[in-house]
Image (spheres, grey):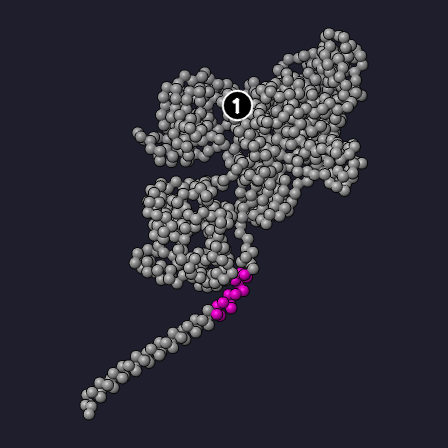
Amino acid sequence: MHSPRGERKQRELFSVKWNWFRILVVAAGSVMLVTLLGAYAFACSYVYLAPSLPATQAMRNVEMQVPLRVYTRNGALIAQIGEQRRIPATYDQIPEVVKHAFLAAEDDRFFEHHGIDYLGVVRAVAVDLISGDKTQGASTITMQTARNMFLTLDKTVRRKLQETFVTYEMEHEFSKQEIFGLYLNVIFFGQRAYGVAAAAETFFGKTLDQLTVAEAATIAGVPKAPSHYNPIVNPQLATGRRSYVLNRMRALGFIDAAAAEAANKEPMQARAHAPLFDVEAPYIAEMARLQLRQLFGVSAESAGYKMYTTIDGRLQAAGNRAVRIGLIEYDRRHGFRGPAGHVELGANGKPEQLAEFVDEYASVGNLSPAVVVSVAEKTVRVYVKTRGFAQIEWDGLVWARKPGSNQTVGPAPKSAAEIVSRGDVVYVVADTSGHAQLAQVPEAQSALVALNPNDGSVAALVGGFDYFTNKYNRVTQAKRLPGSGFKPFLYSAALENGFTPASELLDAPFVLEGNGIESSWRPENSHGKFGGPTRLREALVWSRNLVTIRLLREMGTPYATDYAARFGFDARILPQNLTLALGTLQVTPLEMATGYAVFANGGYRVQPYFVDRIENAAGEVVWQAKPRIVCEECEHPASLSDVSFAGSPDQVLQSEDTVRGGPGLLPAEQLAQRVISPQNDYLMTDMMTDVIKHGTGRRALALSRTDIAGKTGTTNEAKDTWFNGFTPKLVATVWVGFDQERPLGESEEGAKTALPIWIHFMREALKGVPQERRPMPDGIVTLRISPITGALVSAENPDGMAEIFMADHLPAAGDQGSMAQSAEGAGQASGEPIF
């Protein structure tokens, strides 16, 4: 029999159990209800947000902003241009050490979870609570990829739900390798860099395969907080973050303890690097960008287009070097203007401190800033930006005379202390062996452009000493006076007008009286001397101004300007007066090179171009250049086997076209138009060859070639100096002057400023190129003349010399040439406008 007390205890125990049971039932029901409500809300959220989510096909076809890439003809990279620095890399192109670093830093269970790492979330919360610092992230690589590719970075519930749904879709539609590859291409690192390849280039100036373990860990640590862990802006914080990544890599077995310790000891050497390139041609890169924008609009700049230019990488490098050497040589002739700055050095200047001082100064072209550390009797020790310590010997200092008045220089220095002091910041030309030479940023400027004369393709283009200091492209934008460089076009006109190389004109004082308020014009030769009766060949060789003025006066300026239009000059803007003989028109170096291309290619007009083709992001050719090509045999071909093209080797014969009676040739619209006769061209080239042999261009004899021809050009007070020269396969024009026009200095002229640059360039450009002279065409005859009078003499005359003529423009026996002006002597002339 149970006692009342026992029964009461049993009832109480049952009541407790029943209460717990009800609590459990209610809790389970509540959980089930919340789960159902959550699932319903989640489903409703998906239905509501579905229209805003990217479709599967859209995710596969997403186009990242990829910068425009500009290449040489042979595929060497010139530039990457775009708001975002991005270098696409496939999953297989990314080194394992980089992949491991990002897995360790961001999501070590990436290949195990299905987009949302619940274990990782719990671990992150626990670590954050224990440490009190948010060192662990809960976003997986898939979630970050979804956020960066398809969503905004807003911190809202809506965006978080969208991220979850897109993550789910990506995990089902993409492989893990595809997701990881996308992530490594889209993640943002600061400094405008997107993707690991761009980050490697931006922070370390390296490609992915060149990164060390420490550098890979540094990059992997940045995406968590790009502004916080930027190794350029915050090297100390970045070093701490790198240590965390390395420790994680060791813990996960990606690297061993020794590798982690060695990487941790590496100093943080990140600094801002410009985009890597194979060929330095920034002026061409900008020209290409503008052409792409004209063709396809502004958005094309970030659509992954590739532009293949006509630039030859070897010739471009030669052009860069030639312009810089030439300007530095000119600048040295006019003295040392002093240091670029001064800093106070401590008793023992440490490299870190010295590096900070020079970091404030930008490199300019091939010149690097350096701080003077010590000065000896005839040597100077400097610390060079990015290179370290270097020694300047006396031969690199002795040029530094002090500038005097009127562009003169003082006496040569006798000691290094007369030139620089400790703490001076100077510019130097330095090598990798610890040697340097004192230099300074040139005030003068130069431009160089080289063309293939047989199709007009630009092989090299240098618009100035340094694009990043001054983006003004002097090749295409600077309209300057060509001076005597314009004379060959007038002499060609004269040959077509009945003159010959033996025709004589008077080299004597010449005066044109002005009308009304105009003053008289008294032109002179550059050297101030007069040669009397002078044959046209000699007048061109020695650039006689007075002979050329008389020649133009006989021809008439209307005829001369119309004729000059054959070479691409606009007759409407040419001076309609005798000053044209002195080259007073305004032209760009590119226009001059285009004009000289006619002489180089045998008499054909070509149009300059610099873009060969454009490809879209898919590699499809969307634009192709169609230049007119020189083909002499196409004028009167006997058969297809007789036809050869002087232009690009990529050009091929067409099979069904008929051109000028020749079946199977290129269509007429692809043939360059002949603008001067072969005979005229041959005579002019021969005369300009004499400019090199024994005239104003004889410095070019240093090249030891017989197939070069050209003409110097110098304007009044040497404000513009030129050399235009060519071979049958290459034409190059060089200009030297100041952007703000002023004299280059006493005794400076085209032969001294521009020609040395042309020689430096051609020495490399013609290396290994066989000599080639255009054969003498039909219609040219060789006769003997008197070197004094230009008249024909008998073959037995021992004083005679050979001269070539057009067969239909022969002087009569005993003809003194054209001496119509000889009677006027040194008297006055009138009838032609002066200005």
Q: Amino acid at mark 1?
A: Tyr
Q: Secondary structure at mark 1?
A: helix
**Vertical placement of residue 161 versus 677, above or below:** below
- Camera-side residue of 571 and 486: 486
- Magenta region's main secondary structure? helix
* Residue 586 can be seen in this image: no
**Vertical placement of residue 81 versus 361, above or below:** below
- Answer left or right for 262 relative to 205: left
* Residue 184 can be seen in this image: yes
**Outermost residue toward the bottom in this view:** 1
- Camera-side residue of 637 and 832: 637
Quadrant in the picture for the C terminus: top right
Q: Quadrant of residue 828?
A: top right
Identity of the residue drawn at 49% across and 51% down: 91
- Answer left or right for 778 relative to 353: right
- Camera-side residue of 439 and 116: 116
- Camera-side residue of 707 and 442: 707
Residue 337 within the magenta-colored segment of the rendering: no
Identity of the residue drawn at 49% across and 22% down: 332
**Mark 1 lies on residue:** 330
Identity of the residue drawn at 69% across and 21% down: 686
- Answer left or right for 642 relative to 714: right
Q: How many other residues sit within 10 Å of disc 1, few (<14), some (14-19) or many (≥20)? A: many
Identity of the residue drawn at 46% across and 62% down: 164
Q: Position of residue 543 (x, y in %)?
A: 66, 19
Magenta region, residue range: 43-56
Q: Position of residue 146 (x, y in %)?
A: 48, 58
Q: Position of residue 752 (x, y in %)?
A: 57, 21
Q: Position of residue 657 (x, y in %)?
A: 77, 41
